Amino acid sequence: MSSPDAPAIVLPGTSAPDHQSVRFGFENTYARLPERFYARLDPTPVAAPRMVKVNVELARSLGLDPEALASARGVEILAGNRVAEGAEPLAIAYAGHQFGHLVPQLGDGRANLLGEVMGRDGVRYDIQLKGSGPTPFSRRGDGRAALGPVLREYIVSEAMAALGLPTTRALAAVTTGQQVLRETVLPGAVLTRVAASHLRVGTFQYFAARGDTEGTRSLADYAIARHYPEVTRAKQPYRALLDSVIARQAHLVAQWMLLGFIHGVMNTDNTSISGETIDYGPCAFMEAYDPDKVFSSIDLNGRYAYGNQPPVAHWNLTRLAEALLPLLEQEAGDQEAALASAKEALAAFEPQFEAARMAGLRRKLGLFTERDVDAALAQDLLERMAANHADFTLTFRRLCDAAAGLEGGGGARALFADPSAYDSWAAEWRRRLEEEPVSGQARAAMMRRSNPAFIPRNHVVEAALDAAVNRQDFQPFEELLDVVSRPYEDRPDLERYTTPARPEECVSATFCGT
Ligand code: AMP
Ligand code: MG
């Protein structure tokens, strides 16, 4: 942590005045839901809050003043030491299946929703403090977060946003001046998280587990109004809500698969109704392609392995459908018809997932047209990558160069343990490309928008967190943030961020760190 007399971080060109007013313009639609949906409580103040980072661009997109957020008053608010004007802090109640087991009450054990703000894009966003102290839902937890996991969520969620994926985002990180006890003593921190909402599959399960159909209905109506207003016109709005969530999740998980992202803890409480990636814990981008890859140290059976993510998402959506059954029954007429309706909705997951994945694979391979052989061509590449331990991100990025005719110095083939495995695949690929009257440049340009050069590689993330946590050096964190915020650009000076870990740098496990 920063030493107590170090100056607070001041944004370029600002003087960070002490008593700048911080205007969020909060609205509080969640706080208008029935009292049993949450527990009202303020964040717990901390000893010595210090600013680590304000997300200037995100703040502006939310109509917030980043200078005010970085002011002494802003830091107090972001640490939970002061309740912002208009905020109605609360901890949301939810349940969830954790590794397959239903926990009827989880809830925000270390988070406070402050309120909602309207973004410049017209979307309503939750502003939540994470790590802001114990709540009635804390169970045995201390309500706090350690600096490492806070910076990790900051980096990875911002990387996901820059990659173009639906995700919660990081508005700010502050240190608390307090220690948290995990395996060791660690500096504490609070993350300010921005989400389209914090509604989860587990939020529906909370009411379903209590047989509270009125609660389920209020929640479903809220979810529709907030995320899927178009379904109010449907003949069966609750069925249409289920269809919509399934479609968004199918699309989301397809995008994860296309980037080699492993969420790590796809419990139903970490599955959002809006279709955003949420709750970044032991997540990671894989390097060498391996469908069975698991990073999370707590995922002993590989339940949330890379290749299991689509069926797990389907499983989680099945839990959502179950929770919605009482509402579906009212729409469909009887129980049997409700079950048939739920099954029909769930059956749409796989084709929607496959369509999104295949469309993405075509873009990654530079294909502008659709042929039946494309799926086999993509699968063949993936299998050869797996057999040859080829780096997922780098292989696809180098294919862009190959498409542009710039394949010098080894290119993609050098990433394969047996380069001839690449050569024979590439010959097939080139035959397929020749069917399309597209210039190499145009093809490569499309491919470079789908195949990032920069992902937050695990060893680089770990090094940035280590510097921040153990040496109070936030420079590597800042640099990594800059790198991952422009993932599709070629930046030759940052070449070292594109390469996989050397064997001695390899990160084989990630930890929840809660
Ligand atoms: P997560 O693994 O972060 O998705 O959290 C699962 C559940 O554990 C949620 O109900 C969290 O609020 C709760 N939780 C995680 N860490 C803590 C903590 N340090 N103190 C209290 N509750 C926590
Ligand atoms: Mg969670």
Image (cartoon, helix red, strand yellow):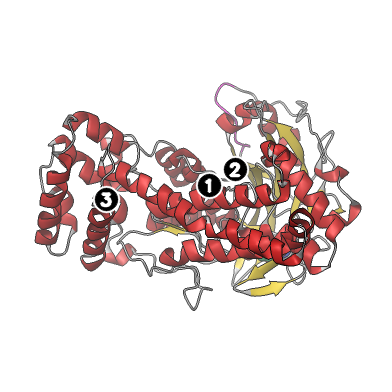
Q: Residue furthest top?
A: 13
Q: Do the residues labelled 2 and 1 touch (CB within 8 Å)?
A: yes
For label 1, the residue is 157
Side of 421 relative to 171 (left or right): left
What segment carries the magenta color?
Answer: 7-13
Please tell me whether mark 1 sits on a helix, a strand or a loop: helix
Residue 12 in magenta? Answer: yes
Q: How far from the left and from the top, in percent, is residue 307? A: 41, 65
Picture layout, residue 337 above or below residue 72:
below
- Indicate yes or no: mark 3 CB to ligand 2 under 8 Å: no
- Indicate yes or no: mark 2 CB to ligand 1 under 8 Å: no
Picture layout, residue 437 above or below residue 298:
above
The residues tagged by marks 2 and 3 sit, at their Cα atoms, a distance apart of 41 Å
Kind of residue sitting beneath label 1: Ser
Q: How far from the left and from the top, in percent, is residue 100? A: 61, 74
Q: Are marks 2 and 3 in contact (CB under 8 Å)?
A: no
For label 2, the residue is 170
Residue name at image x 53 percent, y 66 percent: 312
Q: Residue furthest bottom?
A: 301
Q: Are marks 3 and 1 in contact (CB under 8 Å)?
A: no
Please tell me whether mark 3 sits on a helix, a strand or a loop: loop
